[in-house]
Image (spheres, rainbow, N blue to C red):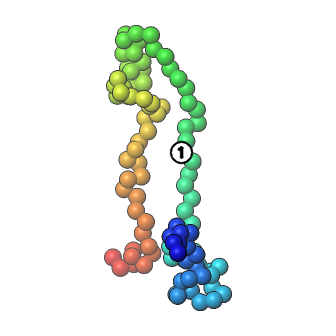
Amino acid sequence: MATNKLNVDNVSNNLFILAGQEDERTPYDWDGMPEFVQPDTEAFAKITVRIRNQEDLDEFIKLMGQNITPKTKAIWYPVLDRNRNSLLRWMDEDDESQD
């Protein structure tokens, strides 16, 4: 008889969870992890700009002060700093006291 491997009840079949503790556990052993809240980073407004010729495009590029190429599909105004959060790290209080 074939079984559906994608429809397996891992909670009731888990040897490491005692009966009655099923509701107290989170998936993937994420117990005690801080809650993560993702801030909304969507654009406030989106507009379509149509440019008639190369001279107008050159002027638009100069006004925006951004690198716009023939492959550019969208830009942020003001320029979006994509590396703004690249150096942020999660530090545990215990790690700081060991320095």
91 or 27: nearer the viewer: 27
Q: Is residue 44 visible?
A: yes
Q: Quadrant of residue 81?
A: top left
For label 1, the residue is: 41
Image location (x, y in percent) of residue 31: 54, 77
Image location (x, y in percent) of residue 7: 56, 69
Q: Residue at x 36, y 56 (%)?
A: 87
54 or 4: nearer the viewer: 4
Image location (x, y in percent) of residue 73: 42, 29
39 or 97: nearer the viewer: 39
Relative horizontal placement of residue 71, taking residue 28 as reference (left or right) = left
Q: Residue at x 40, y 44 (%)?
A: 82
Q: Quadrant of residue 22?
A: bottom right
Image location (x, y in percent) of residue 28: 50, 73
> From what the image shows, is residue 6 above or below residue 72?
below
> From what the image shows, is residue 2 above or below residue 86?
below
